Each structure stands twice: as C-alpha cells, then as structure tokens.
Image (cartoon, rainbow, N blue to C red):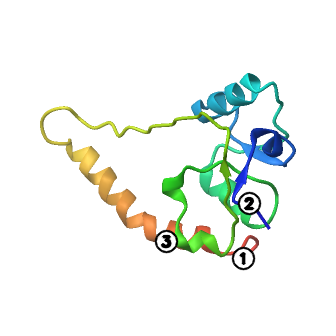
Amino acid sequence: PMPETLTLADVSRLPLMVASPNQSMRHLIDAEFRAAGLKPNVVMEVNSFLLQRSLAVVGTGCIFMSAIVIRDEFRSQLGFATISDSKIIYTLYLASRRAGQPTLAAKLMARMIRQSMDPVRQWMMEPLGV
C-alpha cells in the first residue's frame, strides 16, 4: 500500500515513468531531484500522460500527477501520495485567440475533438491487451 506522503528520497528509490527530457515537466522533476542531491530511478520515458497512467495501473512504475487529475475513477486502481518535501509549482495556462471569432477551421477541429473524446476516454479505461 502507498503511504499518504513520501519524501523525494523515498521517490528516488521507486521505478519512475516520466516524460522525455525535452518536456517541461521533466525539467521541473530533474531540477527538483538535482537540488536535493538525488537521482530519480527512471525506468521508462513516456510523453503521453494517458499511456503513463495506463502503465501505472498495470504496475509498470510510478508517475507524477497533479492534484487536479486525480479523480474518483482512479482511486480504486492507483495509490496516491503527496511528496512532502517537493517545492515544484506547476501552473498550466490555456491559450486562446485574443480577439475575434475562431476561424471555421478552428471550429471544425474543436467539433471533431469533442466528438472523438468519449470513445477515446472509453478506450483508455479498458484493460491493456483488449
């Protein structure tokens, strides 16, 4: 079972699945470990959060998640622990067109994305190999 909190030293001994070094979250994670004089035990580099989550569910390793993406549907499949001595602050921003209406192409793309999300979510929740 996962304890409620872990230290960075604890985390450095776990098998970690992280984004590749060219991703901003990886820069933050590497800097955090460097500042603590630790080296993360990276067993796999995966840039897709959905794939990371699927691999964590089957026990391949541990992943870093922000509190906002921890939802009830994952509580039965994953254990969650805060990192007590982490100083990472990660704020995401949504960029949109500053003025005027979206282009027709942007509207069509948004519609296609909305229409495809339910099947993608359903597919991601299926066990691997199905």
Q: Of the residues shown, which amino acid type is indicated by label 3?
A: Pro
- Residue placed under numbered mark 1 in the picture: 130
Up-down relation of residue 76 to residue 110 (above or below)? below
In whole angstroms, how far apart are the C-alphas of marks 3 and 2? 21 Å
Residue 108 locus on image (x, y percent)? 28, 53
Does residue 105 lie above or below 27 as drawn? below
Please rate how many residues cluster around mark 2, counting C-alpha atoms within 10 Å: few if below 14, some from 14 to 19, many from 20: some
Looking at the rendered structure, the kind of residue marked 1 is: Val
Compare residues 46 and 69 and report the one nearer the observer: 69
Asked if 49 appears above or below 27 in the picture, the reply is below
Residue beneath disc 3: 119
Residue 99 location (% of width, % of height): 14, 33
Q: Earlier in the sequence, mark 3 or mark 2?
A: 2
Closer to the camera, 116 or 27?
Answer: 27
Residue 29: image quadrant is top right
Task: Tell me the quarter of the picture where residue 98 sits.
Answer: top left
Is the C terminus in the top left, top right, bottom left or bottom right quadrant?
bottom right
Using residue 108 as the reference point, say whether residue 71 is left or right of it.
right
Viewer-nearest of discs 3 and 2: 2
Secondary-structure class at tag 3? helix
Q: Position of residue 77 (x, y in %)?
A: 68, 72
Q: Which label is found at residue 56?
A: 2
**Mark nearer the N terminus (1 vs 2):** 2
- Between circles 1 and 2, the one closer to the viewer is 2
Residue 20: image quadrant is top right
In the rendered image, which quarter contains the N terminus?
bottom right
